[in-house]
Image (cartoon, helix red, strand yellow):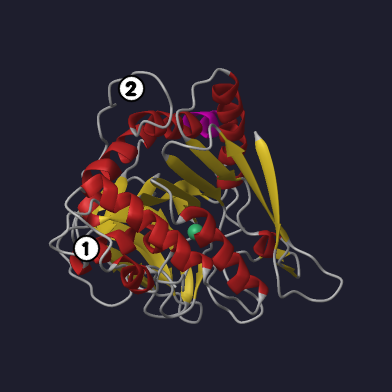
Amino acid sequence: MHTQTLELAGGTPGLRHSLRVLHFGPADGPKATIQAALHADEVPALLVAQALRERLQRLEAEGQLLGRVQLLPWANPLGLAQHLLGHHLGRFDLRDGLNYNRGYAELAAAAATRLHGRLGDDAAANAAVARQALAEAAAALTADNPAKDLKRRLLQLAVDSDVVLDLHCDGEAAMHLYALSPQAAWAAELGALLGARAVLLATDSGDSPFDEACSRPWLLLQQAMAPHPLPLGCFSATVELRGEADTRHDWAAQDADAIVEFLRRRGIVAGRPAPLPPALCEPTPLAGSEPVTAPAAGVVVFHRAPGDLVAAGDVVADLVDIDSGERHALTARSAGVLYARCATRWALPGKRLAKIAGTTLARTGPLLSP
Ligand SMILES: [Zn+2]
C-alpha cells in the first residue's frame, strides 16, 4: 500500500486541508477508485472504507490484485470539519451552500477536441486514447477555493478509472444505488452483491454529481465520435450504504466483501467469481422515483419504513399540524419500494420525507435531492 497526501489549495492562511489516497496493487492493469463520504456526514461510508482497506491490504500481500485500486477513506476533509452549534454539516459547503456532490466539471467536450483525428476502428485502442484525453482534460481544470479544488482533485484522481464507486448514505434507508442507464447490467450485478433494494438509473440526473462526471463523458464521447467504435470505459455508481445511523461492523464487513467481489467480476481482483446472489430488485428509472414531500409544516409520523413495498394510495406518513392537531395523511402516488426517508421528524413545506422507487412517474429537470 502506498499512501499519498494531497494538500488542497485556496484555503485560509494558517489552515491546511489535505486529502488521503491509499493505492493498492500494480501500477498497470484496470483501475478502480473508491471514495468514502463525499458528503462528509454520511458516516457508514467511513466505516466501510476501513473494512475495504483491510481487505485490499490482504489481497495485495497475497498478490491477488490484478489492477490498481485507489481508496479515499475520507473524500471530504472540508466537510469533516464543518460543525455548527453541535451539528455536523457535511453535505454543503458552509461558505456558499453548494452541495459537495454537485457541479463537477463535464469533461466530454474538452476531451472530444483532443480526440479528433486520433480514433480508428479498434474499440479497445480508442478507449485507451479517450481515457488519456479525459485525464488531460481533468488535469487542465483550475480552482480558486478549497471546495472547487477538492472537486477538481477528486475528478483528476478518478476520471481515468474503469470502475468508480462513490460511497454515501441517506437519512434512514435501505441499501440502494444510482448509476447510468446504459450500464444497467453492471449496476444490477453490484446491486445483487450488495443486497440493494433499489437500483436507480438515469442518463443525466442533473447538476453533474461526481459519479456521472466520471461515467457520462463516455456516453457523450460515444455519440460525438461516431462512427468510431468506443465502449463505455468507466462504470460508476453512487452507493447509498443504508441510513446515517447504520454503522455496524457486520454490515461494513458484508458491504466490503460485496465490493471486493464486484472488483473480482471486473478483473481487478484475481479468482473465479462466486455465483451472483439473487437480486432483491430490478433496476428502475430515477425519473420514476417519487419524492413524498410535505405540503405544509408539521410533525412527521411515519407509517412505512425503509425497505417496505408500498402500493399507490398507501399512507406513507401523517403530517400533524401543531396548531389544530389535524392529521394530514400523505399517500404514495406510485407503487414500489420505499428506499429512503428523512432522519428528522419536523417538516417545513416542501421537505422531502420519503422516496419510492416507482415506475409510473416521468419526472423531468434535476432528479436528485438538493
Ligand atoms: Zn450523499
Which residue in the structure is indicated by mark 2? 273
Q: Considering the image in quadrants, where does the C terminus appear?
A: bottom left
Decide if residue 121 is on the left or right side of residue 350: left
How far apart are labels 1 and 2 at the CA level?
33 Å
Residue 82 falls within the magenta-colored stretch: no
- Percent of width and height locating residue 253: 53, 29
Q: Residue at x 28, y 26 (%)?
A: 276
As drawn, the label of residue 288 is 1
Decide if residue 353 is on the left or right side of residue 344: left
Q: Residue at x 59, y 32 (%)?
A: 51
- Percent of width and height locating residue 190: 33, 39
- Percent of width and height locating residue 291: 32, 67
Over which residues does the magenta segment extend? 250-254
Residue type at mark 2? Pro
Q: Residue at x 46, y 70 (%)?
A: 104
Q: Magenta region's main secondary structure?
A: helix
Residue 95 visible? The answer is yes
Label 2 within 8 A of ligand 1 by Cβ: no
Q: Nearer the viewer, residue 181 or 367?
A: 181
Residue 281's place in the image compared with 346, above or below, is above
Q: Nearer the viewer, residue 315 or 223?
A: 223
Residue type at mark 1? Gly
The local crowd at label 2, few if under 14, some if 14 to 19, many if 20 or more residues have their Cα within 10 Å, is some
Q: Nearer the viewer, residue 323 or 35?
A: 35
Q: Nearer the viewer, residue 148 or 343?
A: 148
- Chain-order first, disc 1 or disc 2: 2
Q: Residue at x 22, y 54 (%)?
A: 230
Decide if residue 227 is on the left or right side of residue 10: left
